[in-house]
Amino acid sequence: MKIMLIGHRGYIGPVAARHLAQALPGVELHGVDANWFKGSETDEFPDDAFSSQRKADIRDLGPDDFAGMDAVVALAAVSNDPIGKEFEGATAAINSEAVLGAAKAARAAGVRRFVFASSCSMYGAGSDSFRKETDTLNPLTAYARSKVATEEGLRPLATDAFMVTSLRFSTACGASPMLRLDLVLNDFVATALRTGRIEVLSDGTPWRPLIHVEDMSRAIEWAVTRDGDTLIEVNVGSQDWTWQIGQLAKDVAAALGGVAVEINTNAAPDNRSYRVDFSRYAAIAPDHQPKKDFVEAVSELAAQVKRIDFADKSVRESRFIRLNVLRGHVVEGRLDGHLRWRG
């Protein structure tokens, strides 16, 4: 089986590659990435998991780039709300228009399976009920809106010869060779270790489902090997990994020990609050359910953070915050305002 990972040098890519190489004997992995974050590795990148890797912008891919592939996994994205706010045009162009262009090109090349890394953030401001796949979406940010637009564009492309799976992932977390510290759990662990405390900027009440990057990789394995419906859009995560942000901070502090928690109870409400129903994923992918232990995940992440050279910068000023890296590229003239490499 030949699988292409678009955006393979991001946060998810190296973990997914390791998992797929182990779980699918004989698999041939090919990576394509714009290389925005090359140089931000925290651990050795698993180059040996790939048969080929190349630098390319997803916006430039055509049918010839997908020739011979059995499956394509679209991980490439402008990857969070702060970046989406600052680079709104690029967010729409990459996360939606380019992913749809890649899907059409892959279908034209005869690829049979297309997996899209979608997001539960599409539910936006949820009620107290658990959001199901059939519920109304309420995207509040450019990032969330881009995920909605991509799912809408993928639906008419699905056929018996081109199976589409949109994995609506919970908020990612956990150790990775391409570590991000602009994710809530990762931020809490890193700031706790650097400062001895966790500062919750919101009032702590928003609900958020989380998923470890290893469990995201298990879902990707399922998606590239599954049979059945030509189109599946499914929430991926678990009820056990759903927290209010304030309680998450307290649980991280307890797992690390000796960490104070400060919650800004006077903060304006954060409307990005939602709980999600994962029963459909449990039913259709029983052998690929999340299984990562929370305390183990915090411990692994803490060990990784302790090895990092922050170059005398705070966590939120470091190169492990994606927006900092992209801003640096733009300010120094390497990327233009559309997040394309110059020259």
Image: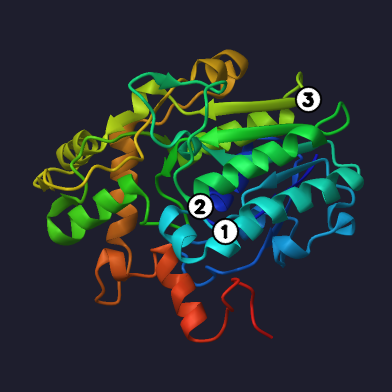
Please name the residue shown 80% across and 39% down the image. Answer: 1
**Amino acid bearing label 3:** Thr
**Amino acid bearing label 2:** Ala
Please name the residue shown 20% across and 39% down the image. Answer: 204
Q: Earlier in the sequence, mark 1 or mark 2?
A: 1
Q: Work out whether 92 lies above or below 25.
A: below
Q: Earlier in the sequence, mark 3 or mark 2?
A: 2
Residue under pointer 1: 91
Residue under pointer 2: 142
Q: Nearer the viewer, residue 70 or 170?
A: 170
Q: Secondary structure at mark 3?
A: loop
Q: Work out whether 160 lies above or below 138.
A: above
**Residue 133 makes an appearance in the image:** yes
Q: Secondary structure at mark 1?
A: helix
Colouring scheme applied when the structure was drawn: rainbow
Q: Work out whether 325 lies above or below 22.
A: below
**Amino acid bearing label 1:** Thr
Position of residue 34 in the picture relative to residue 267 (left or right): right
Q: Mark 1 or mark 3: which is in front?
A: 1
Task: Give the image location of residue 197, x and y in percent.
Answer: 13, 53
Task: Give the image location of residue 342, x and y in percent.
Answer: 65, 83
**Residue 18 makes an appearance in the image:** no
Residue under pointer 3: 230
Q: Which image quadrant: the C terminus? A: bottom right
Position of residue 171 in the picture relative to residue 108 (left or right): left
> Does the CB distance between marks 1 and 2 fall below 8 Å?
yes
